[in-house]
Image: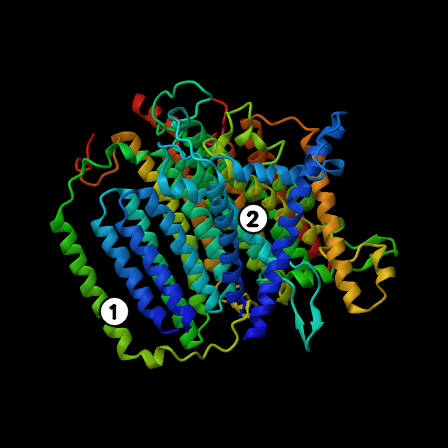
């Protein structure tokens, strides 16, 4: 039953966005002047193609986000399991090891200047 | 079967009506608040106190021409605002507006999508927010919007890390993932006056989450990706009329959803405000209404805080912004996690 | 039963778009949709934590990485001067169909044994309790693996070190 | 519930087809991700059928490993693109410079 609720909510959100777009395209007037159709570069004539090389820092940020996100997300079951266990010392030992590895990775990232944005 | 369908539709309508209904009001509060802080009047011509101004804006967006530039990618150009709005609306499905209600012989849970991973689901879905932006940047095929989209996504992504550390810390303190248990463990009072909100258990995690909310919803001082003075207008550069309005709505609803999560975790969600439980007595109908009212009041205060910060703090430079995210907030989040875990361990050993 | 068929159809459509779409960015976004529908299937099968992790890790981080790399390596400029060898397509579809036929046969023979559900309690508490007393060592080794991949990805993509090596 | 077995088999074979058929490296990595999804689905179906919880835990570890694999795979693609300016499998034939 929960699942049907989520699908209904998703469909209603989609129809809402679609209806808004539909109304606007119906009511708006249609005037196809060439000047509007061009790439917008604050009025100046567009220069160069849009697909040019972008900085590698964006990619390095995304990849470090992925790896650290996986590490932090898997702390979640640890947090929920900690409430139920009796031998908490064993759990804390694992937590300390987990955090040491996380911090070693983090320190490597910081002084590897991979995320230094100012050139 | 029919009763279940009615229940789902009723809940969806209530959950969608609250933020969408409040949206024009929030835009109006933003404009009037900005004017109030800059010692000017703000819109007060249309209707009493200018309250009809947002409706006039919505009508304007309806009637503007749907410009469809030729150089954009055809399908993805119109799909991007729809994706942005839908992904912004999805976390609302997991946020309960009131406590479980005993009616028609069984307990009805007010949130649309009930699972014992409530807070984690809302957080996971709000992590998908950067797809609308990426799609818009790529589809409009324009240097500035592509760069704006990349910068907005890199910023949202790097602040999501510190957000997830504070979420893990709070889940560790509460021990559960279920929103109703989280809120019921926040309803007591210390010395009769201070409410036992999560904020007082974990002030550092609350600060981290607050900063994360500003960065995640691209609000000043973190709105570099769409800053007018930086790169023209960021990812929604090639969009006009209703498509731009959809991005605008998506940003506000994302902001409402994240501040609702913040209030659930740190300010007791729908638990009654201090004065309210005297009024409530204990007939359930009044309690539910007051619970919804206290949640709405808390979210309204959060929205006012957003407006307040927007017109006081200057905008970050991009490298300062990324350094703050990676070199300041993330270690703070990890340290806070370690300190909480060790404190809880040594306290009850 | 209707929801099973709906979700299967959605997954099939999106995964076909991943393999057979012309532009790779379309493939990346349809992979994102496949991962989201698989997360819905996990939820429908009752494994709630896995569906949340799938949405957050797979759909929320890995797919972003693909779109970022696609924006970094703009593929449009050499998209069209690639000749499509029909022969390679035929051979690969043949191998796929043979393999699919074998799998379908294997599943078909003992479908009754497979579709009986005798999972007693599927709650997260028992899952995590087992995770942290039987599988504690792999959990710790997973962090070491993540550390290794952090170091590797930074060293591989960092530009300046590569130049220094060449100058020597 | 039983239709998902066929679905996971289909996902795996489709991913295999994509890996063989696709020309540029990123699409090959995409199709590998598809194969991983198919196999993970199969693990969960078996855990439901046999009541043996360990296969669900294995899916958790599979997600960690797929994250690492995608991270390093894409870094290699970036490094390759930087050196050879192309990521098409037909152009990458010479091992030396």
Quarter that holds the N terminus of chain B: bottom right
B206 vs B6, nearest the viewer? B6
Any mark on residue A18, and which? none
Mark 1 burial class by Cα count in 10 Å: few <14, some 14-19, many 20+: some
Q: Is residue C62 left or right of residue A5?
A: left
Give the secondary structure at mark 2.
helix
Going by the picture, which residue comes out furthest to the left? C87
Q: Residue at x 21, y 60 (%)?
A: C96
Percent of width and height locating residue C163: 34, 24
Q: Chain of mark 1?
A: C
Residue B228 against residue C88 in the figure, above or below: above
Q: Residue at x 61, y 64 (%)?
A: B10
Q: Can you identify the residue that label 1 sits on?
A: C103
Q: Give a yes or no on whether discs 2 and 1 share a subunit.
A: no
Percent of width and height locating residue C42: 45, 64
Any mark on residue A99, and which? 2
Foreground: disc 2 or disc 1: 1
Residue B103 against residue B159 in the figure, above or below: below
Q: Residue at x 31, y 52 (%)?
A: C17
Quarter that holds the C terminus of chain B: bottom right
Q: Is residue C35 left or right of residue B113?
A: left
B318 vs B253, nearest the viewer? B253
Q: Residue at x 51, y 72 (%)?
A: C122
In the picture, residue C15 is in which quadrant?
Answer: bottom left
Q: Are marks 2 and 1 in contact (CB under 8 Å)?
A: no
B136 vs B31, nearest the viewer? B31
Percent of width and height locating residue B25: 69, 42
Q: Is residue A79 visible?
A: no
Percent of width and height locating residue D72: 36, 43
Mark 2 burial class by Cα count in 10 Å: few <14, some 14-19, many 20+: many
C-alpha distance separating marks 2 and 1: 43 Å
Q: Chain of mark 2?
A: A
């Amino acid at each position: 039953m929960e699942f049907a609720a989520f699908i209904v909510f998703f469909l209603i959100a989609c129809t809402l966005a679609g209806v808004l777009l539909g109304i606007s395209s119906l009511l708006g007037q249609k005037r196809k002047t060439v000047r509007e159709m061009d790439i917008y570069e604050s009025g100046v004539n567009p220069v160069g193609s849009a697909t040019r090389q972008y900085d590698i820092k964006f990619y390095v940020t995304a990849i470090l986000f992925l790896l650290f996100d996986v590490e932090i997300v898997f702390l979640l079951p640890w947090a929920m399991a900690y409430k139920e266990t009796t031998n908490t010392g064993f759990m804390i030992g694992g937590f300390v090891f987990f955090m040491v590895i996380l911090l070693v990775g983090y320190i490597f990232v910081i002084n590897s200047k991979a995320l230094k944005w100012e050139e | 079967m029919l009763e279940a369908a009615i229940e789902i539709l009723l809940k969806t309508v209530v959950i969608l009506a609250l933020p969408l209904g409040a949206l024009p009001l929030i835009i109006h509060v933003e404009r009037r608040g900005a004017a109030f802080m800059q010692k000017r009047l703000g819109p007060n011509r249309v209707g009493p106190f200018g309250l009809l101004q947002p409706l006039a804006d919505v009508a304007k967006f309806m009637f503007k021409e749907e410009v469809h530039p030729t150089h954009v990618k055809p399908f993805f150009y119109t799909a991007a605002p729809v994706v942005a709005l839908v992904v912004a609306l999805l976390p609302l499905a997991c946020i309960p507006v009131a406590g479980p209600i005993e009616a028609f012989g069984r307990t009805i849970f007010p949130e649309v999508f009930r699972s014992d991973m409530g807070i984690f689901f809302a957080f996971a879905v709000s992590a998908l927010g950067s797809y609308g932006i990426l799609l818009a940047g790529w589809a409009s095929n324009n240097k500035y919007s592509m760069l704006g989209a990349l910068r907005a996504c890199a910023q949202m992504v790097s602040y999501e890390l510190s957000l997830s550390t504070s979420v893990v810390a709070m889940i560790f303190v509460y021990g559960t993932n279920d929103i109703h248990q989280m809120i019921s463990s926040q309803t007591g009072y210390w010395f009769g006056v201070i409410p036992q909100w999560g904020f007082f258990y974990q002030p550092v995690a609350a600060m981290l989450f607050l900063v994360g909310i500003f960065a995640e919803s691209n609000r000043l001082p973190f709105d570099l990706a769409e800053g007018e003075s930086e790169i023209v207008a960021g990812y929604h550069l090639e969009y006009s009329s209703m498509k731009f309005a959809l991005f605008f709505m998506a940003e506000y609803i994302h902001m409402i959803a994240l501040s609702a999560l913040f209030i659930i975790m740190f300010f007791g969600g729908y638990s009654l405000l201090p004065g309210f439980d005297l009024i409530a007595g204990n007939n359930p109908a009044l309690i539910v209404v007051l619970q919804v009212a206290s949640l709405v009041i808390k979210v309204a205060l959060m929205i006012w805080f957003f407006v307040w910060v927007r017109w006081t703090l200057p905008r970050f430079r991009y490298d300062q912004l990324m350094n703050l995210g990676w070199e300041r907030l993330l270690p703070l989040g990890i340290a806070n996690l370690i300190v909480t875990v060790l404190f809880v361990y040594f306290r009850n050993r | 039963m209707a929801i099973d068929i709906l979700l299967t159809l959605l997954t099939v459509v999106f995964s076909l778009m991943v393999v057979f779409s012309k532009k790779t960015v379309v493939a990346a976004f349809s992979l994102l949709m496949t991962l989201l529908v698989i997360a819905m299937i996990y939820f429908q099968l009752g494994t709630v934590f896995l569906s949340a992790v799938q949405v957050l890790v797979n759909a929320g981080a890995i797919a972003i990485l693909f779109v970022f790399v696609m924006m970094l390596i703009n593929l449009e400029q050499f998209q069209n001067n690639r000749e499509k060898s029909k022969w390679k397509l035929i051979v690969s579809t043949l191998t796929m169909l043979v393999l699919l036929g074998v799998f379908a046969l294997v599943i078909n023979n003992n479908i009754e044994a497979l579709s009986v559900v005798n999972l007693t309690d599927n709650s997260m508490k028992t899952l995590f309790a087992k995770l942290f007393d039987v599988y504690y060592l792999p959990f710790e080794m997973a962090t070491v693996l993540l550390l290794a991949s952090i170091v590797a990805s930074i060293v591989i993509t960092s530009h300046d070190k590569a130049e220094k090596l060449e100058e020597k | 519930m039983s239709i998902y077995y066929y679905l996971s088999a289909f996902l795996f074979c489709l991913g295999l087809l994509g890996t063989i058929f696709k020309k540029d490296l990123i699409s090959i990595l995409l199709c590998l991700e598809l194969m991983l999804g198919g196999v993970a689905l199969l693990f969960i179906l078996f855990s439901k059928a046999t009541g043996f919880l360990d296969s669900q835990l294995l899916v958790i570890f599979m997600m960690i490993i797929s994250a690492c694999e995608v991270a390093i795979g894409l870094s290699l693609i970036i490094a390759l693109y930087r050196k050879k300016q192309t990521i098409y499998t037909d152009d990458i034939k010479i091992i030396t410079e």
